[in-house]
Amino acid sequence: MVVIAPSEPEEVVQLNVTSYGLTPREEKIVKHIARGRSTRHISGALFISKHTVHNHLRRVFEKTGIHSRREMVQRLFFLDILPDTLGN
């Protein structure tokens, strides 16, 4: 039997993250940002410097073609889930 159902938001997010070719570390940082965590909190949670967090963020921004944390969260987490509410 084959069951076709809409994707869950978590599945869409994983596909979006994978489609941009983010590394596992970049993915962890993106997930922290989506939870509203600060650079200081992320660096402490992942045992890396704030400078390293910023470097990972810069690479995420380059890979996704965005310029801010807010835009990143919209693109990776909401754009494909809620296209009508974001003006697309």
Image (cartoon, rainbow, N blue to C red):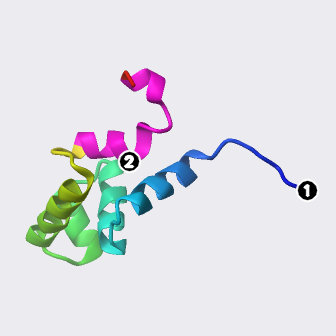
Most foreground residue, 67 or 41: 67
Relative to residue 26, is residue 66 drawn left or right?
left
Q: Is residue 40 visible?
A: no
Quadrant containing the C terminus in the rendered view: top left
Mark 2 Cα-neighbour bin, 10 Å: few <14, some 14–19, many ≥20: many
Check the image and name the residue furthest to the left: 51
Name the residue tied to disc 1.
1
**Residue at 47 percent of width and 39 percent of height:** 80
| Three-letter residue code for mark 2 | Leu
Task: Provide the major secondary structure of the magenta segment.
Answer: helix
Most foreground residue, 33 or 25: 25
Mark 1 Cα-neighbour bin, 10 Å: few <14, some 14–19, many ≥20: few
Q: Nearer the viewer, mark 1 or mark 2?
A: 1
Most foreground residue, 21 or 25: 21
**Residue at 43 percent of width and 53 percent of height:** 16
Residue 62 is covered by the magenta coloring: no
Query: In the rendering, at what x and y percent does residue 31 appear?
Result: 37, 57
Name the residue tied to disc 2.
76
Label 1 vs 2, first from the N-terminus: 1
| Three-letter residue code for mark 1 | Met
Check the image and name the residue furthest to the bottom: 47
Check the image and name the residue furthest to the right: 1
Quadrant containing the N terminus in the rendered view: bottom right
**Residue at 61 percent of width and 46 percent of height:** 8
The magenta region covers: 70-86
